[in-house]
Amino acid sequence: MLMASGGKRIHVGGVNAAILKGEEDVGEWDEEELWRGRRRDTAGTFRGRPPTVVPFEVHQELNRRKLDEALEVCRSSVVDAVKLWQELVADHEADMKYRLEAARQIADRVLGKPVDRTQVEVSLRPEPWREAIEVAVVGSMADVIDVEPEDDWPEWDEAE
């Protein structure tokens, strides 16, 4: 049994328990199994109630596959994108602003993007506002009173 937030007990099935123990590899699951958060039965269908809890590993695997798929689509589109920029640079009827932007994009990728210089100043002295706060904040009474206590009790004459 697992405990959910709030202390409620959650029952996980055998497959989910195996995933949580690292005994089940969700990399072998097909995409529909990942979307549903459970394995197919022996007949190849999904019968019964859907799971109440889906292990994080299932979610991670589905995200990894989707991101890999998106990256592959981007990779296959790179050549078309560069050809489009090339056509735009060569198109003398296009607005010069767009032609220059396309030329800059090509140059940045072929020659490398120019380095932007950034000047950084480092000072070991704290900012004035921080210094004022550090002086104003005290840690103990010893920091506030920096004098030795005096015996200022009046002396009583016992004869009186």
Image (spheres, helix red, strand yellow):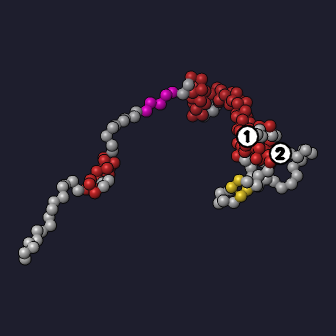
Q: Nearer the viewer, mark 1 or mark 2?
A: 1
Task: Tell me which residue sits at (90%, 44%) in the image.
Answer: 42
Left or right position of 149 against 53: left
Decide: is 148 above or below 117: below
Left or right position of 73 against 48: left
Instruction: Measuring from the top left, give residue 87's x and y in whole percent.
Output: 67, 28
Amino acid type, mark 1: Gly
* Helix, strand or loop for disc 2: loop
Would you name the residue on which mark 1 appears?
22
Decide: is 113 above or below 46: above
Amino acid type, mark 2: Arg
Task: Tell me which residue sits at (18%, 58%) in the image.
Answer: 149
Q: Which residues are magenta?
A: 114-118
Would you name the residue on which mark 2 appears?
39
Task: Tell me which residue sits at (32%, 53%) in the image.
Answer: 139
Q: CA distance from mark 1 to mark 2?
A: 16 Å
Q: Point out the residue furthest to the bottom here.
A: 160
Q: Is residue 91 visible?
A: no
Q: What main secondary structure does the magenta stretch of the protein show?
A: loop
Instruction: Measuring from the top left, give residue 136's x and y in whole percent.
Output: 29, 54
In this view, the residue in front, 72 or 58, is 58
Q: Let me know if residue 115 is in the magenta part.
A: yes
Q: Point out the residue furthest to the front here.
A: 159
Q: Point out the residue furthest to the top here.
A: 111
Instruction: Measuring from the top left, give residue 97's x and y in whole percent.
Output: 57, 34
Left or right position of 104 against 147: right
